[in-house]
Image: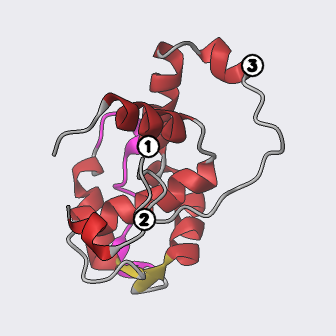
Amino acid sequence: DTVTWDGFLFVFLQFCMMSKMELCQTMFYVIARKMKSWTVHYLTSTQLEEFYQDFTDCPVRSFDTKSIDFTKLSLVKYHMTDFIELLYRFSQLINPCMHLQRSLQQSLPSLKFWSDYDRGTTYNRKVTIDFFRHKKVTTISELVT
């Protein structure tokens, strides 16, 4: 798929302005898509284990998931709110995404810009599948094309 410059810029700015909670919601959809989940209503502990296996024994300590035994977690299915709680409990699950965001902020245009950026009232938005869609769809035919 080809992304237009406007579309790229929109997604980039949306990503750079996200709070930690919004990043957690985004990770939920990223994992669901990457693991080819049948549903976007929940993730299984098996899907989480498979997604995060590349971070086991990671040399970056804050990304290392070796200490997390996904088979012994309290739930088998993680709905969005459960997943967010899990990421707050085990910060190494969200740290790579937060690091990516911070790295982009430092370089484009600069960390000072994002530190001085006036966000107005800080709040956590609900991130849906359409959150990063540059042009909103109103019909099924627009979604397919």
* Colour logic: secondary structure
Q: Position of residue 80 (x, y in %)?
A: 52, 74
In the rendered view, tell whether residue 119 sits above or below residue 145: above
Q: Nearer the viewer, residue 27 or 4?
A: 4
| Count of marks overlaid on the render | 3
Q: Amino acid at mark 3?
A: Asp
Q: Nearer the viewer, residue 44 or 3?
A: 3
Q: Nearer the viewer, residue 72 or 6?
A: 6
Numbered disc in front, either 1 or 3: 3
Instruction: Identify the residue under disc 1.
Output: 97
Indicate the position of residue 43 as horizontal and vertical percent values: 37, 77
In magenta, the rendered stretch is: 58-73
Q: Residue at x 52, y 17 (%)?
A: 106
Which marked residue is nearer to the observer: mark 2 or mark 1? Answer: 2
* 106 left or right, relative to 134: right
- Which residue was labeled with disc 3? 116
Crowd class of label 3 (few under 14; some 14 to 19; many from 20; radius 10 Å): few
Q: If you read the primary sequence from the N terminus, does the residue marked by circle 1 or circle 3 appear first?
A: 1
Q: Position of residue 78 (x, y in %)?
A: 45, 80
The residue carrying mark 2 is 129
Query: Residue at 49% across / 56% down in the picture?
Result: 131
Seen at 40% across and 43% down, the residue is: 63
- Amino acid type at circle 1 is Cys
Amino acid type indicated by mark 2? Ile
